[in-house]
Image: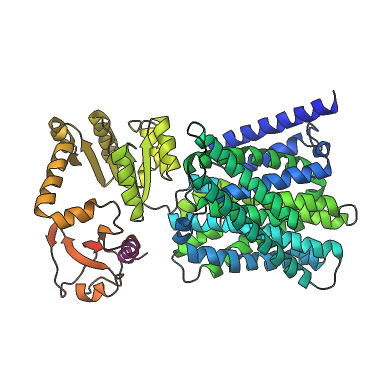
Amino acid sequence: MSEAASLIGAVALVVSLGVTAQLVGDWLKIPSVAFLLVAGVLVGPQALGLVDPAMFGQTGLQAIVGLSVGIIVFEGAYHLTVERVREASREALGLVTVGAFVSLVGTAVAVRVVFGTGWPVAVLVGSLLIATGPTVITPIMQVVPVRERVAAALETEGIINDVIAAILAVATFEFVVASRSSPLVVVEAFVARLLVGIAVGVLVGGGVAALLKRLNLSTGNAPQNARVVVLTAAIIAYAVGGGLLSEAGIAAAAVAGIVMGNADIPHEEDVADFKGGITLFVLSFVFVVLAAQLSLDDLRALGIGGLVVVIVVVALLRPLGVFLSTLGGRLTLRERAFVGAMGPRGIVPASVATLFAIELRPDDPAAATVLVGTVFLVIFATVMFQGGLARHFAQALDILPMQTLIVGAGRVGRELATRYESRGEEVVLIDRDPDTVERVRADGHRVVSGDATDAAVLDRAGAERAGVVVAATADDDVNLLVAQLATTRFGVDTVVARANQPDNVAAFEDLDVETISAGFAVADAIDDAVERPALAQWLADSARTGDVLEVELSNDSLIDRTVGSAVEELPDGCLVAMVSRDGDERVPDSDFRLDDGDHLTLVCETNEAMRDARALCRGE
């Protein structure tokens, strides 16, 4: 077989294994990285010998891996919107500073003590293991529906720390290979690459975003052209940054992704879908090829010491770093414990460690063994252990929040989801139309595809944790069956059903569920517009930033206090309009004393004030 045919065959095998690993990972709800690594080891020279990374050549492999990492980092950063960062800005800042520092120093000390390496090599390993990439965090968050602030903190940390780890590792590697006496070379190299990456990323990302907004991409092929332009921008940012300074391309790609993801470019949904598919492809290819290059002798050479370092990194340094970096933040103690248990490493440490080991092995094989062996041991352990058990961790810590299930992702369902999510509620939509599911998912909503009249679909959507189920389809038969399943099988406390035909209202009420008749709802809206025009206009204004909130009081610090004193604790712009106790509603005066279990109706001027008020009343 010719060399070209062998290369094509190897590429076809790698791609096939990558796709299979993705499918298996989705099926088992485990990050596909675990299966990609196993597949790579099995087909590599150490096992079946079907794929030899040497056939790509050292320079070719470096170029392929580097460009792939740039695309992956760009795709992750593209989803790092300002709104998402605000969900957990304080925690994310702590994780990428204090948390990263604890991980770097602690890992370096562990490697130095256990293996007896020099400090430069130990710091190099510590630099790489800062990274907790979005390629493994995001799949975990898709199957573990924690609160948005927890997911936002983890995903923001992963994206930023990927960049920090790559640049810091390259800077440290220069110190290792140059054998310079002053460690200041690491600081200088890190700052230089970071500044170059930021400058290139802003210029490329901002320039391409402005071009897309002003350029007529042609009516027929506009979405396709936008996708190609954005992908080209990612490649250009990586190439220009890397051309100016090695590995500055990763920072440039990340910054370009952030800029374009927040620029409101045309056809944003089509671009996001396209980038996601490209990223899955290159991720699969790179992970399999890198794992194929992994030497099992490197792992065996570490012996018990390798396991000791893994335990220190996973069970000691990660929880310690998270605890210190989230002090005084919004995360509860149990949520902090969950974040401390979630630190899976991904593509950046795997790729950079492999490339560095190739350069180190001729002159310092022991250092190369420690580097690649430790990094891959930590990747294997964290992906398998943390990724596979993430949902069990969340359940054991009882941090999976009560959520609202909305059956029917039509106009009514989408509008309800938008309103609930703006108030900080966890919402899952269910719809059986594939096109609707994809459209709603592109809008950023959590959605489950399937027929909600099937109890298995409701169970998959998390009905056992639902505090509210809303049956909002245009089919009364579907709504009736969903309401029946929610009340009888899953025991949901609050079930609301949409009755499209007035004649069906009695059937819903027989189930003892809250029923909203479409005709009566229109009549009520008209009555409100006539009798209460100011309130009706405010509630109907889609651009408003606040809303009316009802929340059950469970915060001990507010119980047995007067409304007047409790209001002082509420965020600015919130007032107590009504208190419901034992089925009786009253408009309280300032001397009315609150009790445990009271339902407070609050009017809040902003969504942020509403979220803070809900958290305060619940004692979160």
Place of residue 174 in the rendered image (x, y in percent of width and height, measured from the top left): 80, 62
Place of residue 298 in the rendered image (x, y in percent of width and height, measured from the top left): 81, 49
The foreground one among 386 and 326 is 326
The foreground one among 84 and 469 is 84
The foreground one among 150 and 204 is 204
What residue appears at the point 73 percent right and 32 percent down from the top-left corner? 11
The foreground one among 569 and 258 is 258
Residue 3 versus residue 109 in the image, above or below:
above
Q: Is residue 304 magenta?
A: no
Q: In the picture, which quadrant includes the C terminus?
A: bottom left
Place of residue 91 in the rendered image (x, y in percent of width and height, measured from the top left): 50, 65
Q: Which residues are magenta?
A: 609-620
What residue appears at the point 58 percent right and 34 percent down from the top-left corner? 24
Location of residue 179 (image quadrant): bottom right
- Horizontally, residue 352 falls left or right of residue 368, namely left
- Horizontally, residue 241 falls left or right of residue 60, namely left
Prevailing SS of the magenta stretch? helix
Q: In the picture, which quadrant includes the N terminus?
A: top right
Residue 469 versus residue 311 in the image, above or below:
above
What residue appears at the point 78 percent right and 50 percent down from the top-left corner? 355
Q: How is the image coloured?
A: rainbow
Q: Is residue 619 magenta?
A: yes
Residue 143 in sight: yes
What residue appears at the point 54 percent right and 35 percent down from the top-left corner? 224
- Horizontally, residue 17 falls left or right of residue 521, namely right
